[in-house]
Image (tube, helix red, strand yellow):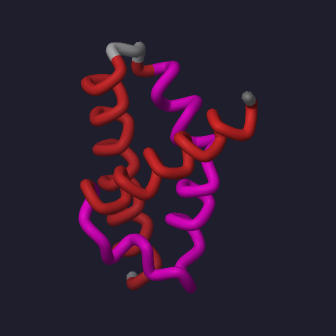
């Protein structure tokens, strides 16, 4: 039962992250899903020891944006 609730929290945050990316970057749902599901942030969100799922969606989104910013700097 507890695992179901944790998975639900992760699912809700993930949906919000995808929506935020779509709105902020004018990208498709598929592109946003690819970004989220392949991110370190998503990995941490699914690691129940990090307790990242307790944070708000907007907090996790800021975390994701920082990750993406760092990645884009590393590509240059």
User: What span is in magenta?
Assistant: 30-57
Q: Is residue 29 left or right of residue 33?
A: left
The main secondary structure of the magenta stretch is: helix
Tell me the residue at 60%/46% (across/down).
70
Is 54 within the magenta? yes
Point out the residue furthest to the right here.
75
Q: Quarter of the image holding residue 47?
A: bottom right
> Between 50 and 25, which is closer to the camera in this rendering?
25
Q: Position of residue 4 (x, y in %)?
A: 41, 72
Q: Quadrant of the N terminus?
A: bottom left
Q: Is residue 39 left or right of residue 28?
A: right
> Between 31 and 24, which is closer to the camera in this rendering?
24
Tell me the residue at 28%/26% (across/down).
24
Q: Is residue 3 above or below residue 32?
A: below
Q: Quarter of the image holding residue 29?
A: top left
Q: Is residue 71 above or below residue 29?
A: below
Q: Position of residue 15 (x, y in %)?
A: 34, 43
């Amino acid at each position: 039962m507890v695992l179901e609730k944790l998975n639900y929290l992760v699912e809700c945050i993930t949906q919000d992250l995808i929506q935020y990316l779509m709105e902020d970057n004018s990208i498709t749902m598929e592109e946003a899903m690819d970004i989220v599901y392949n991110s370190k942030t998503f990995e941490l969100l699914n690691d129940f020891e990090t307790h990242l799922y307790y944070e708000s969606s907007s907090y996790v989104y800021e975390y994701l944006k920082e990750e993406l910013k760092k990645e884009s700097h590393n590509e240059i």
